[in-house]
Image (cartoon, helix red, strand yellow):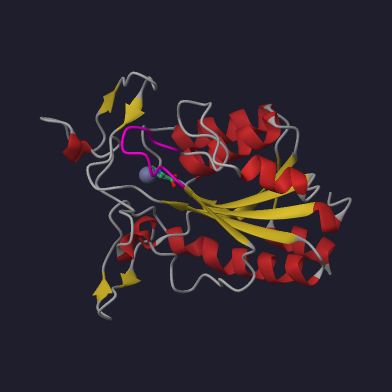
Amino acid sequence: MLSNITRTLLLEIDVQNDFCPAYTSAAGEQIPNGALAVQDGDGVIAPLNALAAALTAAGGRVAATQDWHPARHISFASSHDGKKPGDIIDLAAVAGQVLWPDHCVQGKQGAAFHEKLDLEPINFIVRKGFRRGLDSYSAFFENDRCTATGLEGCIKQLNVETVIIGGLATDYCVFYSAMDARRLGFSVIIASDAIRGVGYPEGSIEKATLEMQANGISFATSAQLLEELR
Ligand code: VGL
Ligand code: ZN
């Protein structure tokens, strides 16, 4: 599965407070749930930390993404008169944009990585969705499908050939990142116990999973991957 570990990258998608069920605020209070909490979202952290440590020790690389929106971002329902989270609208550059609660606002605690995520093994961080008028799910391209984040050039220069993906959310940022990675010619493995999904609209997790499988993206548990990294 992992033919060349030094040419393998672990891509940790959006393990941020706002996608997690609970987190600690900057002032030290327990916040009961992130603005766009994914069920059991923090369940991805333990397998990702284990994979990151093992991959780094074996000579591979780790990157993380951070959803990083300005206030009044176009993906926020609050930016559109009369719209509420969950409504779906067509934008000039993007058909079928789901509108979300305000989340991952630049510099706010909701946008910070969850405190349990190990930051030491992360070699680089890609921020996305920072243009007010354009959303970005994928780690590689924003939702107009052509504005690059720079991650492709970065990891091609490092001769990466295999990308292991985990994080949040299965049916949005993980899905689009995996599909783009595949399209760009990387071999892609989803760490199956290190992803959790939004599940909106209904069936979106199953649909995303089938589409990834149909496109040659493979799935392996973190235990299986760790076995190969030992
Ligand atoms: C995400 C919805 C909005 C994600 C980001 O990380 O999957 N989903 N912004
Ligand atoms: Zn977002």
Residue stretch in magenta: 128-136
Q: Which residue reaches farthest bottom?
A: 28
From the viewer's perspective, is residue 167 above or below residue 94?
below
Which residue is located at x 56 percent, y 71 percent? Answer: 119
Percent x, y of residue 212: 63, 33
Which residue is located at x 62 percent, y 33 percent? Answer: 180
- Whether residue 219 is visible: no
Q: Which residue reaches farthest right?
A: 3
Percent x, y of residue 206: 52, 35
In the image: residue 173, left or right of residue 79:
right
Screen quadrant of the C terminus? bottom right
Percent x, y of residue 118: 56, 72
Tally of numbered tags: 0
Residue 26 image-quadrant placement: bottom left
In the image: residue 2, left or right of residue 146:
right
Q: Quadrant of ligand 2?
A: top left
Q: Which of 229/118 is in front?
A: 118
Residue 125 image-quadrant placement: bottom right
In the image: residue 34, left or right of residue 215:
left
Q: Which residue reaches farthest left?
A: 82
Percent x, y of residue 226: 76, 64
From the viewer's perspective, is residue 33 above or below residue 147?
below
Q: Which of 187/41 is in front?
A: 187
Which residue is located at x 48 percent, y 34 percent? Answer: 142
What's the magenta bit mostly, secondary-structure-wise? loop
